[in-house]
Amino acid sequence: MSHRPIIDAGPGLNFLSINQERLLISVLGRLSAPETVQDEVLDKSRRDKRFRSAEKVWRKLTPDWMQILSDDQTPELAAVVQRITHQPMAERLKRPKDLGEIMVIAHAVVTAETGQKVTVLIDDGQGARTATSEIDRLKRLRRSGRPVGSITLASTLTVLERAAQKKRIAGKADMRQLYRRLRELDDGLPPIEATRLLSPDLWP
């Protein structure tokens, strides 16, 4: 059984701000996000004009295409947050830095521990490393016989590669244009030449 992909604010802001929500959904399907991520997206869209379109698109997507996951403290959620941050959840929720990605990972772990498969969409380097650590932990639990599910880590680059494979992007020129718009919003994305996005195997 699979859970809706859980997205972090960074890639969510990027795709929604340039009105590429259909591309995102065509690759990942119906989405979900923690309340913290929703707050981050809406706040950033109001404070930074580059992301102004994101709020309107986000509200259009909820609740059908974007399910909001409650960040209310539960024993399961609190245990994961405590383990990955070394802080009680109530304290960690008071610190906004990197909170969205922490809650993305925490929700994914709680979901996976019920036996489901879930994808997380995270671009941030530290967030990706934490997610990878949790992915490895779940693998160890499965090897020991625990009936847990799994987490798959995806990024903006993953989404774009899959979009090319699914013919959701017409050609290399369109990919270049789309990626240029994304990089204008996110300088953490590498130059396109340093990615596989123009690789011949994506454009047979």
Image: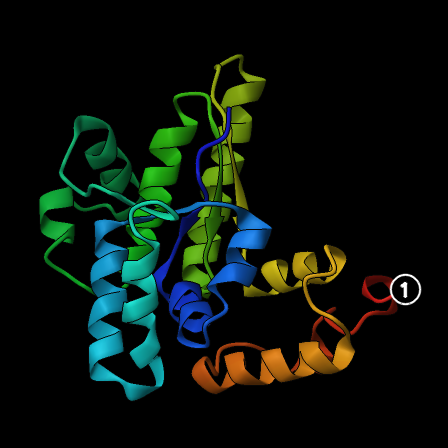
196 or 42: which is nearer to us? 42
Name the quadrant containing residue 3. Answer: top left
Q: Residue 139 appears at what percent x and percent y?
A: 55, 29
Q: Is residue 110 left or right of residue 129?
A: left
Residue in view at x 27 percent, y 60 percent: 59
Q: Is residue 70 left or right of residue 170?
A: left
Q: Residue 14 appears at what percent x and percent y?
A: 44, 72
Name the quadrant containing residue 165. Answer: bottom right
Residue in view at x 22 percent, y 51 percent: 35
- State whether residue 14 is above or below residue 144: below
Q: Residue 152 appears at what percent x and percent y?
A: 55, 42
Label 1, secondary structure: give it: loop
Label 1 CA crowd tier, 10 Å (few <14, some 14–19, many 20+):
few
Q: Is residue 189 left or right of residue 40?
A: right
Q: Which residue is mark 1?
A: 204
Q: Residue 103 appears at what percent x and percent y?
A: 28, 48
Q: Is residue 105 left or right of residue 28?
A: left
Q: What's the residue type where badge 1 is placed? A: Pro
143 or 202: which is nearer to us? 202
- State whether residue 18 is above or below residue 65: below
Name the quadrant containing residue 38. Answer: bottom left
30 or 182: which is nearer to us? 30
- State whether residue 172 is above or below residue 145: below
Q: In this view of the protein, can residue 116 be seen by the observer?
A: yes
Q: Which image quarter holds the C terminus? A: bottom right
Q: Which residue is outermost to the top? A: 145
